[in-house]
Image (cartoon, grey):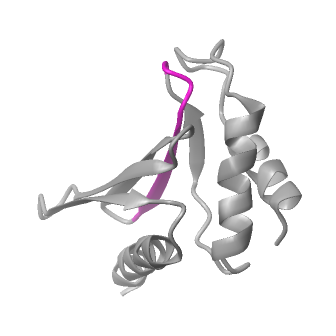
Amino acid sequence: MDSAKWTVHLMEKMNLEGTENFHVKISPWNLSKLCESMAENLSNTFPFPNDCFPTSDGNLQMEWLYGDVDSTLDINLSSLSSHFHSYNNETEEEVGFMLDLEKKEDWKKLVKSINAIKLKSEL
């Protein structure tokens, strides 16, 4: 998928209404950098987030919900550094790690983690 399609998908998923950050503007340049990295490093089978929200500081948070597991990816759009956090509400198991979204191996780590969570929820 090219960066323009990733941009459209992210914009469609961004839930601005009903959040305290609906007035926050995300830099188009920074969002473009993220989408270019997504286009370069992800396949069309990427487990796209359930929701995307702008943060109060103009960055982005993605959320995945699979079964009892809530996962978030907090992305600093200017540096493409991010923090992944996953919490299982039933077992109280937590996982968290930092990622550099300019690196293909970090995208692979993210996809592997999300797919593992998704697979466990389907069992």
Which residue is at 43% across, 59% downward? 100
Residue drawn at x 47%, y 57% as measured from the top left: 64
Taking the spot 56% from the left edge, 37% from the top edge, the residue there is 78
Residue 77 in the image: above or below residue 43: above
Q: Is residue 85 left or right of residue 65?
A: left
Q: Would residue 123 be found to the left or right of residue 18 on screen?
A: left
123 and 104: which is toward the camera? 104
Taking depth in this image into account, of 31 and 73 the one nearest to the observer is: 31
**Is residue 90 found inside the magenta-colored segment of the image?**
no
Q: Residue at x 84, y 67 (%)?
A: 2
**Percent from the top left, x then y, of residue 47?**
58, 71
Q: Where the N terminus falls, by quadrant?
A: bottom right
How would you classify the magenta stretch by its main secondary structure? strand
**Quadrant in the picture for residue 90:** bottom left
Q: Quadrant of residue 52?
A: top right
Relative to 12, is 86 above or below?
A: below
Quadrant occupied by the C terminus: bottom left
Residue 54 percent coordinates (x, y) = 57, 30
Rendered position, 65 above or below 111: above
Q: Is residue 18 left or right of residue 74?
A: right
Q: Residue extending furthest left?
A: 92
Name the residue nearer the viewer: 86 or 80: 80
From which residue to which does the magenta span run?
56-66
